[in-house]
Amino acid sequence: MLQGKRILLIVAGGIAAFKALELIRRLRERGAAVRCILTEAGARFVTPLSLQALSEDRVYTDMFSLTDESEMGHIQLSRDADLLVVVPATANILARMAGGLADDLAATVLLATDKPVLAAPAMNVRMWTHAATVANVEILKTRGVTFVGPNDGAMACNEHGPGRMSEPEEIVAAIESMLATNRPLAGKRALVTSGPTREAIDPVRYISNHSSGKQGHAIATALARLGAEVTLVSGPVAVVDPPGVRTIHVDSADQMLAACLAAGAVDIAVCAAAVADWKVTAPSGAKIKKKVGAQPPPLELSPNPDILATLSKPGPRRPALVVGFAAETENLVANAIDKRVRKGCDWIVANDVSPAIGTFGGERNTVHLISTVGVENWPTLTKGEVAGRLAARMALHLAGPRSAAAAE
Ligand code: PMT
């Protein structure tokens, strides 16, 4: 809930501005007060009247308006807010924010504010991947601006790729996470692995699997929402980096292990990545040539390091709670019980990855939570719900033996 929270929504000029209307409706449903600043370009896509009708507040547009300044100065607009949200965060407004411009009311308020800022980018895929935008986003991130999205998908310009603005419910979730007061994991550090690994055969070929990163990324988001300082080590995925989470991108299992160890001491480790069990012993430095009539080249494999087992090893650096996943296509629970013992983790989350079930890449998951106490069968949930439940259980576990026993 966002009861009593005050959101200052900055609506900039992009086709996705229409989603601001739905966002206002959802924020108000949750009890937030919404006040809008509409840029000149934004007013070409949505009218001040629509924003005013939905927010039930006046809409601010002009920095040099005597009425605006006398009734509510640009500094006061930011002072009165708990959070500033830029939606859509166009390439232009991101560039103006990064450059510290104050050439209209929106940019001036963003420059003058000391409140947290959330930006929901939306733009053509080439604008999003342009070196200038990449650099601007990097600058803003280092200054503490939080980003939600953009998503990958079809865009209004008939192109496909990253640049599509997050849906209103995703933006609401990011806002709730930034303004959450119930943060039982505040002061705790968490490490999450997610996605597949890629094991090189040669510079152009690799061994990998179908993991999309959706489950692991959702867990990182859920832990951050409860206040944990989260490091996410992700293999190559198309899903976006979760807001408010430090994400480290890797390719291979060796790199994933090194990034996990470099993350330092943590209280919680969750290994949701689908790590390749084997790597090619001696990947070729050059593309292996296909010779007409010759046999395919043999691939000699050697085992990858086991990240979960490494993190679970007893010792002063062992996290207080280590959670693994078990991806099985048969004897799900029995195999997962064995796996938990073999790897030495505290809990294991078993899920069926048979193609017919659609766990890899899908939106939902049916899991069994296995601990030393026993097996809990959870109903089919969205991956976000699985993550939310799991994070809540971890918070309860870390809160102390009495709360944990009640939960288990
Ligand atoms: O990414 P999605 O498309 O959302 O799909 C989610 C998922 C199916 C990938 C996820 O829910 C899941 O099951 N992740 C674990 C996949 C896996 O590799 O399972 P496993 O049973 O092979 O491995 C058991 C555990 O050991 C896992 O926690 C794994 O991260 C870990 N492991 C495995 C091998 C290795 N070398 N190092 C490891 O840390």
Image (cartoon, rainbow, N blue to C red):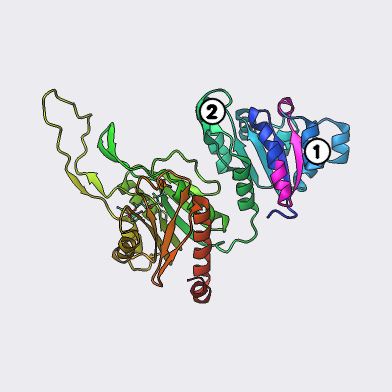
Which residue is painted at 82% across and 40% down in the image?
A: 73
> Residue 86: percent from the left, percent from the top?
66, 38
Does the stretch in magenta take in 33? yes
- Does 394 appear above or below 253? below
Instruction: Look at the image and give the residue range highlighted in magenta.
Output: 24-45
The residue type indicated by label 1 comes to Ala
Residue 53, label in figure: 1
Q: Is residue 189 visible?
A: yes
Q: Give neighbour class at mark 1: few <14, some 14-19, many 20+ (Cα, 10 Å).
A: few
Q: Give neighbour class at mark 2: few <14, some 14-19, many 20+ (Cα, 10 Å).
A: few
> Residue 8: percent from the left, percent from the top?
73, 43
- Does 377 appear above or below 361? below
Residue 132, label in figure: 2
Q: Quadrant of the N terminus?
A: bottom right
Q: Is residue 266 visible?
A: no
Alpha-carbon distance for marks 2 and 1? 37 Å
Seen as rendered, the residue at the extreme front is: 356
The residue type indicated by label 2 comes to Ala
Q: Which is nearer the eye, 242 or 77?
A: 242
Seen as rendered, the residue at the extreme left is: 294
Which residue is painted at 69% across and 45% down in the image?
A: 26
